[in-house]
Amino acid sequence: MTEPVVTDRNPIPAPANRIPTPSSPAPDIVRCAYMEIVVTDLAASRAFYVDVLGLVVTEEDDEAVYLRSFEEFIHHNLVLRKGPVAAVAAFSYRVRTPEDLDLAVAFYEELGCRVERRTSGWTKGIGDSVRVEDPLGFPYEFFHEVEHVERLAWRYDLQTPGCLVRLDHFNQVTPDVPRAVAYMEDLGFRVTEDIQDEAGTTYAAWMRRKPTVHDTAMTGGDGPRMHHVAFATHEKHNIIAICDKLGALRLSDHIERGPGRHGVSNAFYLYLRDPDGHRIEIYTQDYWTGDPDNPVVTWDVHDNQRRDWWGNSVVPSWYTDASLVLDLDGEPKPLVTRTDDSEMEVTIGADGFSYTREGDAAKGFKLGNTL
Ligand code: XXG
Ligand code: FE2
């Protein structure tokens, strides 16, 4: 049997073009907390996230809807903001103390990034915050103070079969994954899993602050773009219930990939596209990573079970499509092209190959239907 390689260190070497390590300590990030997305039709997006997926409205007005999951006690996990171009305005992390905001300012100023302090109330429910255009071009936000709201974990009278219980992670598209990983490690993240080839090209990496497989992942591609935002359910059957509901509503065209079992993370998954094409993952049952000796898992890019444990194909749109991100003026960030090999091309097409058993790869065996 071919198993993923388990190592006890981060095996991705820091690249020559690495972003310098700041001398200022990194802010202590607790977890990914919310994403702010710009949507072009607020009513259509509200219908998708509230009426179909069942997220809870904490607050709303004509410009924005603030949504949370059922176990959440902070004001929101997702902001839908009305705007002209579908994009992502913020990847937001909660930090441990108010002083961590000063650390975030010092850390990013040393990197020469644009940094803005925003006072309490700029975003409903959020206290003072720091927004930056990070060295990879992503709009990152850090906050500590936040309005607490009712945790609806025990409100079984309100919960539906496809109940979304937590925000689990973000996923970002960036052209140079090792460069991104070195910077994220400086920011205090630890790699849990990655995908590489025998030549050492890195295609994707998963990184955590909270003790799950990830708070965010870096996916190789033209970037900066947002690949997806993921919400957790308690169980696999909750994900099946979401598929059944989409079918019953004749909305199955929102399903892009899955349901299935990931190789990476071992989680059960489903990917959906919202009315603007923003990608949402529904995710459940990855593993605990809180031990300091948590081993890094490295997958071979040619292993056709890495992204789907059952060997099902990954649709091309999952590799190619992603959402634009905005700078701090609200303008879309221009894209930088990936120059390393693309995962889609090395695993399909004339020169690409995937294997289920490693020996078959050595014989040059190609699977017809595997991306
Ligand atoms: O959360 C994830 C993902 O990044 O969405 C994708 C966990 C695993 C995978 S993969 O497709 O690599 O199995
Ligand atoms: Fe994911």
Image (cartoon, grey):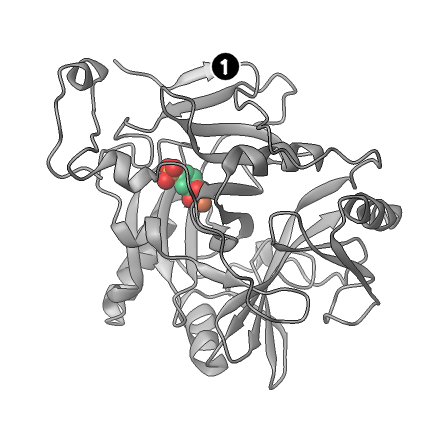
The kind of residue on which mark 1 rests is Thr
Look at 61% across and 16% down and name the residue there.
Answer: 293
In the rendered structure, the answer to whether residue 190 lies left or right of residue 279 reads: right
**Residue 96, horizontal then vertical, whole percent:** 80, 44
Q: Residue furthest bottom?
A: 62
Look at 42% across and 28% down and name the residue there.
Answer: 201
Instruction: Provide the residue designation for mark 1.
Output: 7
Q: Quadrant of the N terminus?
A: top left
Which one is in front, 139 or 244? 139
Ligand 1 lies under 8 Å from the Cβ of mark 1: no
**Residue 31, horizontal then vertical, whole percent:** 66, 44
Q: Residues within 10 Å of mark 1 (few under 14, many from 20)?
A: some
Q: Is residue 297 above or below residue 277?
A: above
Look at 79% across and 53% down and name the residue there.
Answer: 144
Total labels: the figure holds 1
Q: Secondary structure at mark 1?
A: strand
Q: Is residue 290 above or below residue 243?
A: above
Image quadrant in which you'd find residue 361: top left
Q: Does any portion of residue 132 appear in the rendered image? A: yes
* Ligand 1 found in image quarter: top left
**Residue 287, horizontal then vertical, whole percent:** 50, 30
**Residue 189, horizontal then vertical, whole percent:** 65, 34
Look at 45% across and 57% down and name the residue there.
Answer: 163
